[in-house]
Image: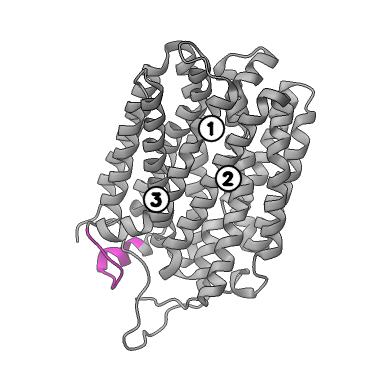
Amino acid sequence: MVVLDAPPVRDTRRVSAAVAAAGVSSFALLYAPQPVLPQLAAGFRLDPGSASLTIGVATGALAVAVLPLAWLAELVGRRRVIVWSVLASAIIGLLLPLAPSFSVLLAMRAVQGVAVAGFAGVAAAYLADAVGTARLPAAVGAMIAGNSVGGMLGRLGAGFAAGPMGWHGALLTVALPSLLCALFAALTLPRDHATEPGSGIAALGPKTPEPGAKTAGLRPGTGGEAPGGGSPDVATGRKAGLGAGLIGPFAVGTLATGAFVALYNAAGFRLAAPPLSLAPAAASLVFLSYAMGTASSAAAGRLAARLGWTKALVTALAVTVAGSVLTAHPSLPIIATGFAVLTAGFFAAHAIANAWVAAEAPPSARGRAAGVYTLCYYLGSGLGGTAGGVVYGHAGWAWLIGLTSAWLALAVLAVLMTRRPR
């Protein structure tokens, strides 16, 4: 069993804070157009499916770019790629309100998606090297929490600004604080050599455990596991690299994310339409549900330690389905409750799946595994989100719930098929 050196807790907190700030910036920018999709549709004379391309193009470009940028990070250093990523995406965010046409807006969003890929595809591997496997679930949970905070604040800021300032002012309102978060991350990420190419934890290699030393991490893929020793099936999974042991979390990245983004892309249209007929600021309050995602992602590591990663992931996906079904009710309070429940479930599932990939992959393939997971995640976001907008525009909310529930059920099946015997 490999024992990984861990940095001091103070340094771990610094790394986690910087990566969380980068997540706030990146995801506020990536999803800021979501609450103003109805305004974009009205301004450019688009249907819901076409307006959803504002999200789908960015996440699709991110998916295409994530693996090349993960490979680039292995050459030039993960910190460097993260810093350039967050700064470039924030600068593009400042330029988006100047787009003279929808086609230009889409082109700029594609470039912004490529920029965000540098953070999204590298951050988990960076954390694995920077904080050690023993602290990885908590660090990844903090990163996902930062992502959810950014997504929530970006959507709320844009939604509240859309009424008095239009979509142009709404996007600018999000871009300015995002730039500040990006600058904080760039100045705070450690400059030591622990996360540079060919060094750090991934380069330490096997060590002989000290008497009484704790070995690293949770054993993904079995029920009821806890931190501790390894087993032959885990060793086999690590040797396999990006093999069967990662099918479940990769499926969650694609299918669950597609369902989640599809529901939120269509939420603004449903809340603004009769009989609810909410104003943009009131409709954007649905994104307060991201606070539930922040809490659940931060707690995901404890859930995995208690239930085992397979059971925890299936539970989180089941909660997501339950929440999405609640949103079919015509009552606004129940709709809001449904969004809170499905958001909590999704972010817990995302955090567990993300940490599963980072822990399951061997150090030499960790960056590649994180890149593939991110590719799955944003393919799901781009394709699923756009498909959901089309389904909602042509068939309504009930059909969208049926489609997304089917995707989530397939994700559960993939996780259960990935489970290994003790």
Task: State the residue in front, 392 or 413.
Answer: 392
Q: Quickly name the residue at label 2.
A: 150
The amino acid type of the residue labelled 3 equals Ala
Q: Could you tell me residue 116's position as x and y percent?
A: 63, 46
Q: Quickly name the residue at label 1.
A: 382
Tell me if residue 230 is in the magenta stretch.
yes
Residue interval drawn in magenta:
224-237
Q: Could you tell me residue 248's position as x and y percent?
A: 34, 46
Tell me if residue 355 is in the magenta stretch.
no
Earlier-in-chain disc, 2 versus 1: 2
Q: Could you tell me residue 23's position as x and y percent?
A: 58, 51
Q: Quickly name the residue at label 3.
A: 353
Q: Is label 2 or label 3 in front?
A: 2
Q: Is label 2 or label 1 in front?
A: 2
Q: Are marks 2 and 1 in contact (CB under 8 Å)?
A: no
Earlier-in-chain disc, 3 versus 1: 3
Look at the numbered disc 3 and give the secondary structure of its residue: helix
Q: Is residue 231 above or below residue 285?
A: below
Q: Is residue 312 above or below residue 154?
A: below
Earlier-in-chain disc, 2 versus 3: 2
Task: State the residue in front, 420 or 192.
Answer: 192
Task: State the residue in front, 203 or 277.
Answer: 277
Q: Residue at x 73, y 43 (%)?
A: 176
